[in-house]
Structures are given as structure tokens and as C-alpha cells.
Image (spheres, helix red, strand yellow):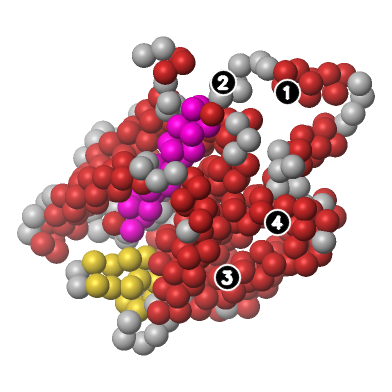
Amino acid sequence: MNKETTYFDKYFVLAIIALLAFGLLMVASASMAISERLYGAPFHFFLRQVIYVVIGICAGLYVLRFSMEQWLKASSFLLLIGIFLLIIVLVPGLGRHINGSTRWVGVGPINLQVSEFMKLAMVIYMGGFLVRRNTEVRTRMVGFLKPMFVLGVIALLLLKEPDFGATVVIAVTVLTMMYMAGVRVWQFAVLVGLVLLALGILAVSSPYRLQRLTTYLNPWAHAYGTGYQLTQSLIAFGRGGVFGVGLGGSVQKLFYLPEAHTDFLFSVLAEELGLIGILVTIGFYVLLVWRALLISRRAFYAGQSSAGLIAIGFSVWMAIQATVNMGVTSGLLPTKGLTLPLMSYGGSGILIDCIVMGILLRIDYEARKAGPDPLVKNASYLDNRESLRRGKTIRSTRQAHRRSRFR
């Protein structure tokens, strides 16, 4: 297939397939012991994960049928559904309480983690809002405060569950999208400062969050208490070394490391596949986010500003969630309940991740169909280079180019 008739990024698709396949392999290895103990079948969780992946892939392929215009028209409706579900999950008897948090709405044996849907709805809504009201967002305080009000409502509902990790992911994603939409620098700086201050106050005002922070600084002092998960994870990293102990050879997954097939899947991977496996996994995530950002760039050049912002939002979301999970399991960040995108066990996460990948492929398809590939040097690119030669600062040039996309 030649370049002119290719309507998808083959490297992006490669990264998706590799992470899904690698995730299945590691879930099978990490969950065998607990599956055997709880259900008498070593592949109970693995088979469920296969079903989740198949459903996710089908959902991702299905959403390819919907144009970005249809997604944008439904963006406000999706946001309202997300807020409604966040309220429902807090109603006693409707929300399901698991591991100290009430984050799931259950229908029979099916549990939906509402925060995953909220991330999707918020990114799509902001992609449409920031383009529709771009002049207002860039020039008037009211346009700046409107998305902050929506973000504040969602953050309050998430913190009631509590789900601090999802709050951080959504907040950083929205801030990045607003910056790319051309929000004035002083407003952005003040907003970032306020968000960081608010998150800091939230982190230290709650006893269990403060305990997590102090434990993170010295987990070995609480090795059999609040630091148990982290110390067991660090032991897994230490045992893995460069080449690992071999696939299936993890000792930490044998009931030493809680949530080995979900939040701490990366720890088992580090123990069994070592530094080599870690670098390969990171490489696939870098490839995924890099190609998603190129899809965003392609959409902007095609004049599809909302789609470009949505692609940026999805890229930041995946990058933050993968980085935080790897940082937590390796002891670089305080413990947070965020899973590895496309890899960790869980139906809601896999389903939403696959839908996100489907939307990104749709953005790529529409952008490629709209015109020539902007990754080849063109007039706009050369004009930007010429502007830099004339002595404009990098910041002013990028800001002017970014704002021109919305006119």
C-alpha cells in the first residue's frame, strides 16, 4: 500500500497491538497464583482479560464508524452522562465499594469504573469547547473560568470517591489542552499554581494521603504496614536485574505483592523480564504517545483544530497514566491507584483505552483524507523556520502559530 492510499499510522497500530499482546502475556503470568487460590483455575483472570481485550478491540473498531463531527456534537451529552454517573456512584447502594474506594457502578457481574469514562468525556468536551469559544478563552476571563468551573465540579466528585489519581490525570490533561488552545501565559501560570496548591493541600489534608506521602519517602520504615506494597515492589525490581528471572519465575507475585495483575503489573514485568523488559515496554509507550502527537499535528495542519486538541488530550492522558504507574511501582512517586494503559487487568480500563485508540485512528483517517501529510516539509513549516530566522522568539512563534489554527 503506497503512502497516498494509507489512511492510518502503521507505527501507532503496531504500538497498540504490542502493548495489548504484552499486557495479556504479563496478566497471565502475574495472576496464575491468585487465580488458582481463589477460583481453582490458573487462567481465570487471563481468560477474562482476553474477553475484555476482544470486546475493547470490537468497540475500538466500531467507533471508527463515527466521524469527529458526531463526537463533537455529542460532547456535552457525554459530559453530562459522566457527571451523572459520578453522582450515582456516590449514592449508597448504587456505587460499589472495593478496596476502600467507591468508584464503580455495578450492573449484575459487570463493574464500570466511572472515572475512566469521565476522562474520555472530558477530553472530547474540552476539544470542542476550546475551539468553539477560542476567542473568549484567549481574551476574556469568563472564557477562562468556564472550563475551570467544569473541572472543579468533576474534581470534587472524584475526590468524594475518593480517586485522587484520576483527578490529577484529568486536571493535567485539561491544563495542557488549554495551553495548546492559546490561553494567555499569565493566566496559565496562575492556574497551574492554583491547581498545584490545591492538589498539595488535598494531599496533606487527608490522613491517609499524608500517610502515603510519608511512607513513600521511607517505605522501609513501614515495611509491614503502609509501605508493604512499595517495599515488595522494590524487591521485585531488585530481583529482576538486567535480564530478569524469566517469564513465570516471579516470586513476588506469589501473594507477596498485592494487586500484582492490576496496579503492580509493571513490578512483575520488571522481576521476570528485567531492565530489558522495562526498556521495551517504555519504548512501546513512547512510540504510542509520539505517534498520537503526530496524529494531532496532522489534524491541525488539516484545519481540524478540535480533533487536534482531542488527540493532544488523549496523548497526555496516556503518557501521564503510564508514567505515574511506572513511577509508583519503582518508588519514584507516591503510591497511586493508576493502571498501565492497555496492559493492566480490568474491563473498564481496557474498554475505554481501546475506544480512545479507535478515536485517534479516526482522527488520523480524517486528517490524512483531508490533505497531504504535513510531516513532509511544506510551506507552513518553511514559513515557521523563516520566522525563526528573522529573530522571533520560539515562544512567540509557537504561540502565534497555535492561535492561527483556531481562526
Question: N-terminal of the two: label 4 or label 3?
Answer: 4
Q: Which residue is mark 1?
A: 380
Q: Residues within 10 Å of mark 1 (few under 14, many from 20)?
A: few
* Residue contact between numbered discs 4 and 3, judged by CB atoms under 8 Å: no
Question: N-terminal of the two: label 3 or label 1?
Answer: 3
Q: Which mark is residue 74?
A: none
Spatial CA distance of label 4 from label 1 is 25 Å
Q: Residue 379 placed where, x, y %? A: 72, 18
Residue 354 forms part of the magenta stretch: yes
Spatial CA distance of label 3 from label 1 is 39 Å
Q: Residue 260 placed where, x, y %? A: 31, 54
Q: Which mark is residue 133?
A: 4
The quadrant of the picture occupied by the C terminus is top right
Under circle 2, the secondary element is: loop
Q: Which residue is mark 2?
A: 372
Name the residue: 26% across, 33% down: 246
Q: Which residue is mark 3?
A: 155
Q: Residues within 10 Å of mark 4 (few under 14, many from 20)?
A: few
Under circle 1, the secondary element is: helix
